[in-house]
Amino acid sequence: MKKISLFFSASLLLIASSCVSVQVKDNKLSTTSTNKKPKNIILLIGDGMGLSQVSSSLFFNDQPSNFERFSTIGLIKTSSSSDVITDSAAGATAFSAGIKTYNGAIGMNKDTIPAPTLLEEVSKKGLSTGLIATSSIVHATPASFFAHVKKRRQYDDIAAFMPTSDVDFFAGGGQKFFNDRKDGRNLYSELEENGFQVYTDKLPTTLSEKKEAILLAENGMPKKIDGRGDFLPDATQLALKQLAQNKEGFFLMVEGSQIDWGGHSNDADYLIGELIDFDKTIGVALDFAKINEETLIIVTADHETGGFTLASDEGDYNKIKPTFSTGGHSSTMIPVFAKGPGAEHFKGIYENTEIYAKMKQLILE
Ligand code: MG
Ligand code: ZN
């Protein structure tokens, strides 16, 4: 009897200690990387992704959640200069340029002065840059990294920034803002004149020697539940292949744009489909960083959309009935997940503009 219990305690101890060693091994990266700086940054933005949206990856995914691969977590406050509840333009400009601005502003401060973006700043230092979205590439979130306009709906104006921008790789929707414009300009030719290879059919399987411009839908990309396939993880894979060729490093922003749209529509299936797709894309980034250890990964959101909750179904605590409280955005704090050199700086509760400040300090200073 004694022998058996001893055996049990010993094996329990063994299990416990093996858990501890796994923990230590996982934490080791962040401990040993305390004073290290990243060469590459991948910023993944789930538009409209609050904690309940993130939690969907635990309950509605047949794969393990990639969010659980992070051990450094923080929270951001997201109000804009004009409103308690931010929109995606002010939210993205906080990340791209480190400033609190008014709802609707793209890469501009509250006095409508263009603000330099991290993408532009790293490019000037010789790093490569990329933008990927499941919206059009001129939609508020990606636009805030390469364009400077007063109002987010100036899509033609935003697209006109792209040919001479500091972007080396982009993928998303938005063809009509490049080839069917009110001013008659053909931005496909302008992109080509500025060293881009333009793709409008599907993701290329091999990379050109040029910069890549990938526009696969007239406006936004199709919904995940309507057969978008693996565009987001695959485009991310492709971008990493291209950008990693630069020995100086790179900055890549990847947006799960339509998590927000599912929230606005109060459509749980739409939202969760987008969230799971974004989760898979996070996995692609984390797998890249496993091999390329000088890569810092940050996953966060501009704001929450829909007042989404994982409520019980009529009081049945074994059944989740996703529920919404608004067709708009909410002001809840937003989680930040970080992994890689410098990740420890993303702990705590801070303003959304700090994301820019921290990234800049780590990659440029
Ligand atoms: Mg967006
Ligand atoms: Zn929204």
Image (spheres, rainbow, N blue to C red):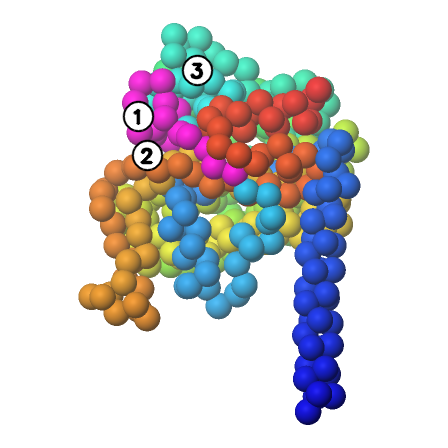
Q: Position of residue 130 (x, y in %)?
A: 60, 34
Mark 2 lies on a secondary structure that is loop
Q: Position of residue 358 (x, y in %)?
A: 60, 26
Q: Position of residue 184 (x, y in %)?
A: 39, 22
Residue 243, by quadrant, is top right
Which residue type carries mark 1? Answer: Val
Q: Residue at x 27, y 63 (%)?
A: 312
Q: Closer to the N terminus: mark 2 or mark 3?
A: 3
Which residue type carries mark 3? Answer: Met
Whether 8 is drawn above or below 161: the answer is: below
Residue wearing tag 1? 84
Q: CA distance from mark 2 to mark 3?
A: 22 Å
Q: Position of residue 155 (x, y in %)?
A: 38, 26
Give the position of the N terminus as an image quadrant. bottom right
Q: What is the count of numbered marks?
A: 3
Q: Which residue is outermost to the right?
A: 247
Q: Nearer the viewer, residue 265 or 353?
A: 353
Marker disc for residue 101: none
Whether 272 is drawn above or below 333: the answer is: below
Q: Nearer the viewer, residue 327 or 31?
A: 31
Q: CA distance from mark 1 to mark 2?
A: 7 Å
Residue wearing tag 2? 331
Q: Residue at x 47, y 12 (%)?
A: 114
Q: Nearer the viewer, residue 221 or 359?
A: 359
Write down the region rendered in magenta: 74-90
